[in-house]
Amino acid sequence: NAGVTQTPKFQVLKTGQSMTLQCAQDMNHNSMYWYRQDPGMGLRLIYYSASEGTTDKGEVPNGYNVSRLNKREFSLRLESAAPSQTSVYFCASTRGLAGVADTQYFGPGTRLTVL
Amino acid sequence: AQTVTQSQPEMSVQEAETVTLSCTYDTSESDYYLFWYKQPPSRQMILVIRQEAYKQQNATENRFSVNFQKAAKSFSLKISDSQLGDAAMYFCAVGNFGNEKLTFGTGTRLTIIP
């Protein structure tokens, strides 16, 4: 049981380049999330998908787009990378059942550097 | 909007001793839940313990326990018999029922002194 997987683990981009971070979960979870982690800032929510076919903005959505490809996969796209997007990106998932306070399970993270 | 404050950026403890990490939060929700996550150098976020706000009894998981003071909006983590493997960043987080977005604190880096 792999849980939540993310690719790639590391990436270096030049300013203006685009890329997509991939996330997949094999736990049949409904809800998926993208966070970024910066030093001294904790984790901040970028986008989330409460269920297949829906996506919503989180706290810091500017400069990002997401796609909930199917129930398993939730991708994060940087259309024109900026140095301010240098960060560690985490994907997470949870069962997403109404009225249930569920634990979020995290992937191993992607360290992205934008030069 | 919810906020989570971890006022101790760094803590250290002797191996086998007990340490308490503090966390305060603010939320306008009546139903919510709280987590402590551990992030070792591997970067993996690992759930340590969780607490539903409607439960009066403090959660316990082996050497880890919480002191949940709902009126004071305080949710501290106590680690007993500290072990070298407990060295990590610890994040406190709050989430709402029906809207599972989590708000995280800025973390406390725990060092275990052999």
Image: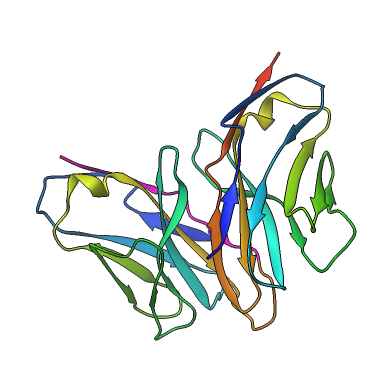
- Range drawn in magenta: A103-115
From this viewpoint, is residue A1 visible? Answer: no
Q: Split into 4 quadrants, where in the image is the C terminus of chain B? A: top right
The spot of residue B111 in percent (x, y) is 63, 23
Q: Measuring 74% from the left and 49% from the top, which residue is drawn there?
A: B75
Instruction: Answer above or below: position of A27 versus B91.
Output: below
Choose between A107 and A2: the one closer to the eye: A107
Q: Residue furthest right?
A: B57
Instruction: Answer above or below: position of B90 versus A100.
Output: above
Q: Measuring 58% from the left and 71% from the top, which residue is drawn there?
A: B100
Choose between A50 and A72: the one closer to the eye: A50
From this viewpoint, is residue A47 visible? Answer: yes
Q: Measuring 69% from the left and 71% from the top, which residue is drawn there?
A: A101
The spot of residue A14 in percent (x, y) is 11, 45
Q: Measuring 43% from the left and 71% from the top, which residue is drawn there?
A: A48
Instruction: Answer above or below: position of B41 versus B77.
Output: above
Q: Residue furthest bottom?
A: A53
The spot of residue A64 in percent (x, y) is 26, 64
